[in-house]
Image (tube, rainbow, N blue to C red):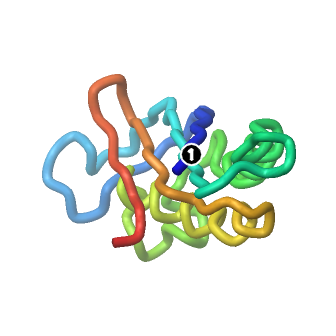
Amino acid sequence: MFEIKITCRFAAAHRLRGYRGQCEKVHGHTFKVEIRVQARKLNRLGLVMDFHDLKELADEIITCLDHELLNELAPFKKVNPSSENLARYIYDELKTQVGKKGPKLKKVTVWESEDSAATYYPG
């Protein structure tokens, strides 16, 4: 099995509804997103997938989140924009697009700080 990984970043604000503590207030992060893609065999060029293609697909999603109040975006109107839910949202948005290129999206990790991250992958 082969695996590649890219990272990208976006800045956004959010608040966690129903949370007791500082995170219930609007606050911001520079989120780091780590995307892992895997394949059993390499393509004819010897790649899992072109890094540039993967970054373009990720940028389409990240651009929609960048410099937004996440709570106001349709996917997070009813669901808290936690790092866990962000990771799942990005995974779901990317899955089909990556699959069209051949490999399989393995998992997405969203870091809200250097020390705190959440990962989503289908069980």
Q: Which residue is mark 1?
A: 2
Q: Residue furthest left?
A: 20
Instruction: Decide if residue 123 is on the left or right side of residue 43.
Output: left
Instruction: Decide if residue 60 is on the left or right side of residue 62.
Output: right
Q: Residue furthest bottom?
A: 78
Position in image of residue 116 (x %, y %): 29, 34
Query: Crowdedness of circle 1 by 10 Å Cα count: few (<14), some, many (20+)?
Result: few
Residue at 57%, 52% (x, y): give it: 38
Q: Which amino acid is tagged 1?
A: Phe
107 shown above or below 9: below
Position in image of residue 92 (x %, y %): 57, 69
Judge whether residue 63 can be spotted in this image: no
78 shown above or below 116: below
Residue at 33%, 72% (x, y): give it: 123
Position in image of residue 101 (x %, y %): 79, 61
Q: Which secondary structure, mark 1?
A: strand
